[in-house]
Image (cartoon, rainbow, N blue to C red):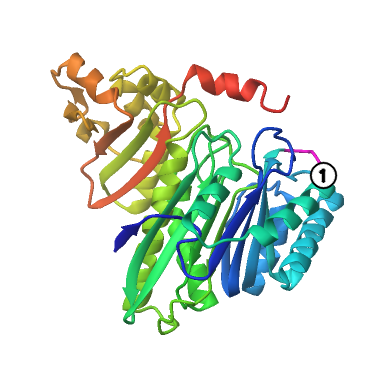
Amino acid sequence: MKQIDGGVTAAKGFQAACTAAGIKYADRKDMAMLYSETPCRAAGVYTTNLVKAAPVKWDQKVTAAGTAQAVVINAGIANACTGAEGYGYCLDTAKAAAQALGVPETSVLVASTGVIGMQLPMDRIRAGIAAMAPELSADIESGTAAARAIMTTDTKQKETAVQICLGGKTVTVGGMCKGSGMIHPNMCTMLSFVTTDAAISHELLQRALSEDVKDTYNMISVDGDTSTNDTVLLLANGMAGNPEITEDGEDYRMFCQALRQVNETLAKKIAGDGEGCTALFEVKVTGAADKAQAVTLAKSVITSNLTKAAIFGHDANWGRILCAMGYSGASFDPEQVDLYFESAAGKLQIIKDGVALPYSEEKATEILSQPEVTAIADIHMGEASATAWGCDLTFDYVKINADYRS
């Protein structure tokens, strides 16, 4: 597998554009469009929140049918809790894009992020579509600009791409995402768009995505709030020319590995850009009896506000980690737990068999002062493991969310 530059336009046949439609922001681009030169097999995974935004409901129908060719994305207004009118605007958006691109309206996906409860200004949405269609480009810069245009409280654009060889052909998988707040395991206020030129059946494409989100996007948390809008879309146009993947074999497994690399990278970029955060916080649980136990423990630590605050303070307050593990609902023996902190500054064991070791507070603070910090908990019950990602909890998180709507 080879890491390459770019994101959603890295794969053959995919183009992107963006524009300043003035939906909410007056000083930046806030709409993006993705387009494939040929129809794509389409897969999607969506929020588990019972309150689902109109674009989620629209995209669920499109990806269930299995084919798509374009995506229209807006930032600033979520089009959530907007009733029949809001859902109708998804159809209106699809019709406008279909007319501009010469594709069926049923092949247009839509995605929105921003404030809940407001209706989309459709005059601006239509104008934005009309402005973007002639500007579509396959260059890397267009993909990066699109990744920037879909941001809300994000501080940086998020994209990545890799290449693999399938059936003697070079296959590319690339993607972009946005997400910073209202982020919690089981999907979040995040939009993720992954494109590939691999030839693969709709059934296997959906299976690959549905399985992969369990260990990537579903293992991140910023604030414990599961959004109404989170969407992950995977489009495959087959333009790499590899023999179509129609069964679970070596080519399918290699494709899944590439998809994992892209999705994990994007998921970590979201966690590391949590609203107001100063550090990516990674939690690894090892030695678990089974995967489910490891997942439960890792998620409990990553969502603990007390632990997140300690990471912000560069404080090796390991008792908060054991506490979060203890109320997780997973059964384990606290007197068998070994705990380590690790970062670019080194690795330090803090407790052994549930009891604190003599360690240097200065070294612990140095380790916890890095922009990426890992806590490793070995519970000595088996061979299973899981990793979750989050961030520290800072003063700025409250500032950002106290006046987000107004």
Q: Measured along the vertical axis of the image, is residue 322 above or below residue 109?
A: above
Residue found 56% across the figure and 63% down from its top: 15
Q: In which quarter of the image is the C terminus?
A: top right
Mark 1 surroundings within 10 Å by alpha-carbon count, few (fewer than 14), some (14 through 19), many (20 or more)? some
Q: Which residue is drawn at 79% across and 54% down?
A: 126
Residue 370 in view: yes
Q: Residue 69: image x %, image y %?
A: 63, 69
Residue plotted at (43% across, 81% down): 241
Q: How many marks?
A: 1
Start and end of the magenta stretch?
116-120
| Between 22 and 109, the one nearer to me in the picture | 22
Where 280 falls versus 50 (above or below)?
above
Residue 11 point in image, percent of width and height = 46, 66
Q: Which residue shows up at 62% across the image and 73% down it?
A: 66
Work out which residue is located at the far bottom of the displayed protein and give it.
Answer: 243
Relative to the observer, which residue lies in front, 165 or 30? 30
Q: Residue furthest front?
A: 134
Residue at the right extreme of this rendering: 85
Depth check: give the residue in front, 230 or 352.
230
Q: Is residue 271 left or right of residue 376?
A: right
* Residue 62 position (above or below residue 7): below
Residue 63 visible within the image: no
Magenta stretch secondary structure, dominant:
loop
Residue at image mark 1: 121
Give, as a three-letter code, the residue at label 1: Pro
Tell me residue 249's x, y (percent): 34, 79
Quadrant where the image shows the N terminus:
bottom left
Query: Which element is circle 1 on?
Result: loop
The percent position of residue 131, horizontal first and vertical second, equals 72, 54
Q: Is residue 399 part of the magenta span, yes or no?
A: no
Camera-side residue: 376 or 141?
141
